[in-house]
Image (cartoon, helix red, strand yellow):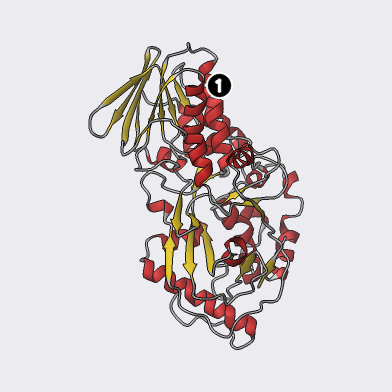
Amino acid sequence: MTADRPLRTSPTVPEPIRHRRTSWSRDPYALGSYSYLAPHRLGTSVRTHLASRVGARLHFAGEATSSEAPATTAGALSSGRRAAREILRTARRGQSVTVVGAGFAGLGCARALSDAGMAVTVIEARDRVGGRVWTEWDGDLPVDLGASWIHGHKGNPVTRLLKATGGRRVEFDYDSVAGADPAGYRELERYVEGMDEHPRADTTPISALLPRNPSPALRYAANTVYAQEYAAEPHELAISADEEGVGGRGGDLLLPDGYTGLVAHVHGDLPVRTGAVVTAVEHSDGGTVTHLADGEPVAAEHCVVTLPIGVLKAGTVEFRPALPETKREAIGALGSGLLDKLWLWFPHVFWPADVDVLEWPDPLDPGLWSWWLNGYKAFGRPVLLGFNGGDHARALAGASDDAVVASAMDALRRMHARIRGTGPGVRSSPMV
């Protein structure tokens, strides 16, 4: 699953000069990073149930509704376009549509409807568009705080967006790794071999394939393969979650220019009402009314809801009348995963400059700060981008920025010492 390369490092690990952190579970308009397929009797059909319209006027889109590419920008974009086609099959030109959410799903839907001559109102709770696609800038360095990659770039609709914008791309090599523990991956492969043929893959968690008391090496490998990929732990993931698509074929692309240009391209000149929080959606055969927190009703003949699965599960938006049981079951069955990032800027590079990934198999807490993107190779800057998923991300979500940075730096120092052979890799400060 991954190859190991020796680390070539400088003698010291400097203090970071600045940082940028995400905490998606604390964002009230996300309440998680992206959806995952939990063990449930509905299996993979749960996404089809979530995507289905309610009556003739209420429609749903978003990465969680995508059967082909859930948890990806490709799935979000395609789902929005699918909802637009659903409306256009019966609607007349000039009819009104409210789109709730200005992420990739909402913008993709609104763009398709607007281009077809519909009167579209896009409502967004945040003060920006993009949703969980979110790029900030540090000088000329794009700091992607949400999506970073295009997964499966061949035949992917987001790759076509990238071509349209002229954005740069870098083929990411997950096997270009320093610091990995190949033994852990070999152990994991032995346990999960043949999992795609499991007779109850929809209702059985991946953890059922693993030993009750996994070794530290196995815990580290399972964290990298599952928590870092699906934002959920093996006991939370259905075996069939490992078979869901990503939107295209081939390898993944990293975007040196970030996602900004792609969001701007889909957004175009679409008017978006930002800072508008939706509290309720009324729907009937006669039309829809979307209610805002300031009391304003927004009437339209159709409404497309693109809320993240975390928000749907929290029930912060009321549906009148209540959604059908099948829809509510689908919302309850899907999980809202958590994958958080920490960007660290350093005065110089102290890690190998020629690898894509640094891994850290922490002997005391396998999986904590286990996966780092080498920003020097990707962006030409002395930057490291660390990830935590699942339980580790949840444990850190409520910690202060200082505590999170201290925890990360402790891991980097012990990783550095272990690989240089100057220390046993023992933690020097309490884990957050």
Q: Quadrant of the N terminus?
A: bottom right
Q: Secondary structure at mark 1?
A: helix
- Seen in the picture, residue 390 relative to 285 is either above or below; the reply is below
Residue 368 can be seen, yes or no:
no
- Picture coordinates of residue 55 (x, y %)? 46, 17
- The residue at the far bottom in this view is 422
- Seen in the picture, residue 250 relative to 317 is either above or below; the reply is below
Asked whether, in this view, residue 354 is left or right of residue 381, the answer is: right
Q: Residues within 10 Å of mark 1 (few under 14, many from 20)?
A: some
In front of the other: 304 or 241: 304
Q: Which residue is mark 1?
A: 85
- Seen in the picture, residue 368 relative to 101 is either above or below; the reply is below
Residue drawn at x 64%, y 74% as measured from the top left: 352
Q: Quadrant of the C terminus?
A: bottom left
In front of the other: 282 or 236: 282
Q: Amino acid at mark 1?
A: Arg
Residue drawn at x 52%, y 37% as measured from the top left: 265
In front of the other: 408 or 150: 150
Q: Quadrant of residue 319?
A: top left
Asked whether, in this view, residue 405 is left or right of residue 46, the answer is: left
Asked whether, in this view, residue 235 is left or right of residue 428, the answer is: right
